[in-house]
C-alpha cells in the first residue's frame, strides 16, 4: 500500500538532480520520498526494508512524446485512436478520451523503466488535439493523470500536406498548413477578445459568448497556459514553427527535431526545448534524411535542452533508454543522457514538481536496476509508483510480474 513506510537500502542512488550516493538509502512514506542519504540515514523500525545492494536506484524514466494507449498494439484498426483526420483543425479532441490503460505498451514501458508518458494525438492534422501526461499504471486513465492538458499538438511538414492533399483539400502544401494554423490562432484571438469584452461590459449589457471548444483550447495556448507541441522534422519546418511562435507569442516545444541541429544556435537562443526522436527508425521519408544518433549530442553541445522520445509505437517504448545509450556512444554526455529521459521531460511537461528526479517531497516513482541503466545488459528488477511496487522481474521465469493496478 502507498501508505506503508519503505526503505530502499544499499544501492547506488542516482537522484539526477545531485550527485550519486553510494550505499544509499531512500525512505518512502505515504507515496512520497521523505529522505535520501548515505548508509548512516536512520531507517524507521516499522519500515519495509528493500535490499538494493549492487543495484542502481533511479527515478522512473519519462517519454515526453508517445502514443501508448491510443495506438494499441496487436489490435489493428479497433485500437487505432491516434488521428482524428476528418478536418484539419481538431484542437478540441483530447488524447485522454482515447487511452486504454490495458494496452500492452504500458507494461512494456514499465519493464523498460518508463513510469510516465505524455500521450499525444497524431500528426495527420495541422492541429491535432490536446496531449496528456500520465503515469503508466492504473485501472482508469483518470487515476493516472499528471497534467491534462499538457499541451496542444500541431504538425508541420509532410504528414498534413499528404493527408489533406490526397483528399484534394486544404492544406495540400507547407504554406497551406502554416496558413491553417495562423487562421486558427487569429480566430482564437478574436474569441478571447469577445470573452474579455463581455466580461468588461456592464451586467445589463452583457451578452453571452457561445462556447467554441476548438477556440477554447487554442486560447489556452495563446494565454501560455499550455505549450504548443510542434511536430516538425526538417530545418525549414522548424524555422516556420519558430516564426509562428514569435508571431503569436506562445510557448513552443519542438517535437522530433530531426534537423534541429542545423539551427541549434537559433533554437538555444530562444530557449526552445527539443523532444528528439525516434532515433531507431529507417529514413522512411524525405524529412528523415538527416536522422542520426549523433544529433542529440549536437543539440546538447549547442545549449539546447533535450528530451529523447521513442514516439511509441514507432520505436517500442521500452527501448527509450537504449536510444539514450547509443546517443552517448555518438557523443552525448552521460549526465545529459539521463536528464533527457528524467528531469528534462518532466520540466517540459510541467510536472517536475512531482517526478523526474529523486528528491524529498516528490512522488516515490522509482526503479531499481540490476546495474547501470545505460548498459544494455542491465534490466529493471523492481518498479514503484507512489511507493507501491507495481513490477518485479522473475529471473526463474525470465519475465516481469505485474501487480494489479
Image (tube, rainbow, N blue to C red):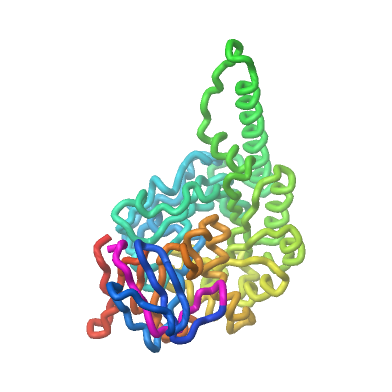
Q: What x and y, as percent, mark residue 86?
A: 48, 40
Q: Which quadrant is home to the N terminus? A: bottom left
| Residue at 63 percent of width and 69 percent of height | 289
Q: Which residues are magenta?
A: 1-18
Please identify the quarter of the rendering in which residue 267 is found: bottom right
Residue 55 lies left or right of residue 149; in this view the side is left
Q: What x and y, as percent, mark residue 205?
A: 61, 12
| Residue at 52 percent of width and 69 percent of height | 341
Please identify the quarter of the rendering in which residue 264 is found: bottom right
* Residue 248 shows in this picture: yes
Q: Is residue 288 magenta?
A: no
Identify whether 91 is placed above or below 270: above
Identify whether 286 is placed above or below 82: below
Nearest the eye: 141 or 292: 141
* Residue 376 shows in this picture: no
**Marker count (numbered):** 0
| Residue at 62 percent of width and 72 percent of height | 296
Q: What x and y, as percent, mark residue 309?
A: 52, 66
| Residue at 61 percent of width and 23 percent of height | 199
Q: What x and y, as percent, mark residue 366?
A: 41, 71
**Which residue, as the protein is rendered here, is positioned at the far top?**
204
Q: Which quadrant is home to the C terminus? A: bottom left
Nearest the eye: 208 or 153: 208
Identify whether 69 is placed above or below 310: above
Amino acid at each position: 500500500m502507498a501508505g506503508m513506510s519503505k526503505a530502499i537500502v544499499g544501492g547506488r542512488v542516482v537522484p539526477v538532480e545531485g550527485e550519486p550516493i553510494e550505499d544509499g538509502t531512500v525512505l518512502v512514506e505515504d507515496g512520497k520520498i521523505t529522505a535520501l542519504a548515505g548508509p548512516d540515514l536512520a531507517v524507521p523500525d516499522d519500515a519495509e526494508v528493500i535490499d538494493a545492494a549492487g543495484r542502481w536506484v533511479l527515478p522512473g524514466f519519462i517519454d515526453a512524446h508517445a502514443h501508448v494507449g491510443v495506438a494499441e498494439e496487436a489490435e489493428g484498426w479497433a485500437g487505432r485512436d491516434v488521428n482524428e483526420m476528418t478536418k484539419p483543425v481538431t484542437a478540441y479532441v483530447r488524447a485522454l478520451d482515447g487511452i486504454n490503460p490495458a494496452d500492452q505498451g504500458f507494461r512494456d514501458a514499465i519493464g523498460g523503466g518508463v513510469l510516465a508518458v505524455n500521450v499525444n494525438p497524431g500528426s495527420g492534422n495541422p492541429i491535432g488535439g490536446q496531449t496528456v501526461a500520465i503515469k503508466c499504471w492504473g485501472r482508469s486513465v483518470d487515476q493516472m493523470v499528471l497534467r491534462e492538458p499538457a499541451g496542444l499538438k500541431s504538425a508541420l511538414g509532410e504528414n498534413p500536406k499528404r493527408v489533406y492533399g490526397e483528399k484534394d483539400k486544404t492544406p495540400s502544401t507547407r504554406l497551406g498548413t502554416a496558413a491553417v494554423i495562423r487562421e486558427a490562432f487569429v480566430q482564437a484571438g478574436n474569441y478571447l477578445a469577445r470573452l474579455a469584452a463581455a466580461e468588461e461590459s456592464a451586467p445589463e449589457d452583457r451578452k453571452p459568448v457561445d462556447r467554441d471548444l476548438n477556440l477554447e483550447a487554442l486560447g489556452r495556448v495563446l494565454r501560455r497556459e499550455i505549450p504548443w507541441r510542434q511536430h516538425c522534422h526538417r530545418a525549414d519546418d522548424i524555422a516556420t514553427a519558430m516564426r509562428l511562435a514569435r508571431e503569436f507569442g506562445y510557448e513552443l516545444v519542438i517535437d522530433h527535431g530531426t534537423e534541429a541541429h542545423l539551427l541549434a544556435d537559433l533554437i538555444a537562443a530562444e530557449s526552445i526545448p527539443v523532444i528528439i526522436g525516434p532515433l531507431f527508425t529507417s529514413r522512411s521519408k524525405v524529412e528523415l534524411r538527416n536522422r542520426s544518433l549523433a544529433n542529440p549530442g549536437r543539440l546538447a553541445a549547442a545549449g539546447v535542452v533535450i528530451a529523447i522520445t521513442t514516439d511509441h509505437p514507432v520505436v517500442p517504448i521500452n527501448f527509450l533508454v537504449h536510444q539514450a545509450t547509443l546517443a552517448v556512444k555518438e557523443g552525448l554526455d552521460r549526465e545529459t543522457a539521463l536528464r533527457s529521459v528524467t528531469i528534462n521531460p518532466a520540466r517540459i511537461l510541467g510536472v517536475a514538481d512531482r517526478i523526474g528526479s529523486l528528491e524529498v517531497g516528490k512522488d516515490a516513482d522509482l526503479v531499481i536496476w540490476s546495474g547501470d541503466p545505460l548498459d544494455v545488459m542491465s534490466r529493471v528488477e523492481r518498479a514503484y509508483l507512489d511507493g507501491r511496487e507495481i513490477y518485479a522481474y522473475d529471473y526463474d521465469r525470465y519475465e516481469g510480474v505485474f501487480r494489479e493496478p
